[in-house]
Amino acid sequence: MVAMENLIAKAEILVESLPYIRNFAGKIFIIKYGGQAMVDEELKKKVIVDIVLLKYIGINPVLVHGGGKEITVWSEKMGLKPSFSQGLRVTDPETMELAEMVLSGKVNRQIVSLINHEGGKAIGINGRDANLLMGRRLPPRKVSIEGKEETVDLGLVGEITAVNPEIIYSLIHQNYIPIVSSIGIDSHTGEGLNINADAVAGELAASLAAEKLIFLTDVEGIMADPSGNREKLISTLDRKAAAEMKEDGRISAGMIPKVESCLKALDNGVSRTHIIDGRITHSLLLEIFTNKGIGTMVVE
């Protein structure tokens, strides 16, 4: 009897997901893949399976990834001392070369292999391919270091100025899952640029008029209380509240580019944006296919 009840419960979950499957069929979802979900082997496998499932039921996932920790590891292996300014990697030509090797040659290929192994069809690309992500170097900026104001040049760190999404549309049309590493190309010099992966996800979502932009993170979502009290999770955050929370410091550090990317995507026709906990098993499916969902949805 208990076994039958469990089976019925599973069937009810499938029924609950039916309206979402119907509404999202054929739509593009941009998924920023990062945090523990990229590191922990068990979590990694479950995220990959979820993404393959999305493709099989008619949704078109596009994965965007960075790999800052991997770059740091390989920098140290190669005898290059990583340098940061207020959380941003200072990227000289040697570090840029290494970043491209790690992101496009190692991290990207691993994700592609995992998806293909689970029955999907993935192809890895970066911003150089078909001029997907055109950009420019960030100008030197003034920062306060030990109470002194100094000018810091981040080197080959860039921001996106234009997205040419034709290659993404072409891969989707051919039933592939595009895996995009966060390397751009300088529109003036042709040099590679190290671009924040959160920003890449937001720009791609805007350019592709995606249905959803989803960030997998290592936190439950955005908290009203910076101490991390789970009961203070904000389920829905609008633009005005986001600005206030940035001003008073409750949204800070790595959460800032995620929220800004969500708002940029909303400005350009993306229907829904989400910041969810990638450490939760099947967090993508819980967010997309259940009535309650998890994490924080950022709205206008």
Image (cartoon, rainbow, N blue to C red):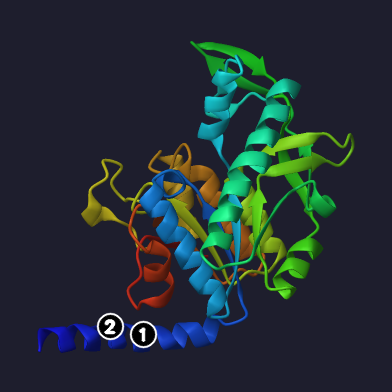
Residue positioned most to the right: 188
* 113 relative position to 207: left or right: left
Asked whether residue 83 appears in the rendered view, the answer is no
Mark 1: amino acid? Leu
- Label 1 neighbour load within 10 Å: few <14, some 14-19, many 20+: some
Alpha carbon separation for disc pair 2 and 1 = 7 Å
Note whether 84 is above or below 135 in the view shown: above
Q: Position of residue 208 (x, y in %)?
A: 70, 66
Q: Position of residue 223 (x, y in %)?
A: 33, 50
* 70 relative position to 245: left or right: right
SS state under label 1:
helix
Query: Answer yes or no: do the residues labelled 2 and 1 have beta carbons within 8 Å?
Result: yes
- Label 2 neighbour load within 10 Å: few <14, some 14-19, many 20+: few
| Among the 4 quarters of the image, the one containing residue 77 | top right
Note whether 12 is above or below 217 in the view shown: below
Asked whether residue 40 appears in the rendered view, the answer is yes
Q: Nearer the viewer, residue 47 or 268?
A: 47
Q: Identify the residue under disc 1.
A: 14
Q: Position of residue 117 (x, y in %)?
A: 54, 61
* 137 relative position to 72: left or right: right
